[in-house]
Amino acid sequence: MLLLLYIMSQYCLCFCHSGAIVAEGGKVVIDKSKLDASNLLKKLKEPGNHTYEVWYRVTSLPSYGVIAVGDQNLTDEKPDFSQVIIDQDGITYTHDDSENHYDYFSLDVWLNQKGE
């Protein structure tokens, strides 16, 4: 099964991202090698400013699986996670074991001040 990530940002559309191959009913960890928008930090006017971090919001959930941070599924009500989570443990996509061989989810990405 092929899983694709679609990423949108008001800053840039160029990120290091790729799809993933997932076995039917299987799961895959989406880590920094598959999702990394830390290049947005270079767009800050103050280089070296470490008061911002990259955040993602799932704008379209997958149809044939779920995305989880740890043991918590991302939902329409709780769709956000940070690059820190991706860098440390990643997020997990789990396929629902259906006969569908293609799935995707969409993300928005932005810079947020730490602690907000």
Image (spheres, rainbow, N blue to C red):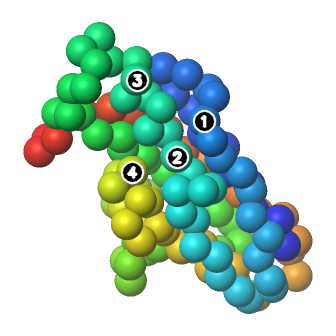
Residue beneath disc 1: 15
User: For the point 47% across and 67% down, which residue is it?
Assistant: 90
Mark 3 touches mark 4? (CB < 8 Å): no
| Left-right relation of 66 to 49 | right
In the image, residue 86 lies at what x, y percent?
44, 60
What amino acid is at disc 1?
A: Phe
Q: Which residue is identified by label 4?
A: 83
> Quick one: label 3, few (<14), some, or many (20+) residues within 10 Å?
few
Q: Are marks 4 and 2 in contact (CB under 8 Å)?
A: yes
Q: Nearer the viewer, residue 54 or 98?
A: 54
Q: Earlier in the sequence, mark 4 or mark 2?
A: 2
Q: Residues within 10 Å of mark 2 (few under 14, many from 20)?
A: some
- Quadrant containing the N terminus is bottom right
- Is tag 4's residue or tag 1's residue first in the polypeptide sequence? 1
Pointer 3 or 4: first along the chain: 3
Disc 4 residue crowd, few under 14, some 14–19, many 20+, Cα 10 Å: some
For disc 3, the marked residue is: 42
From where the camera sits, is residue 86 visible?
Answer: yes
How far is mark 2 from mark 3, CA to CA?
13 Å
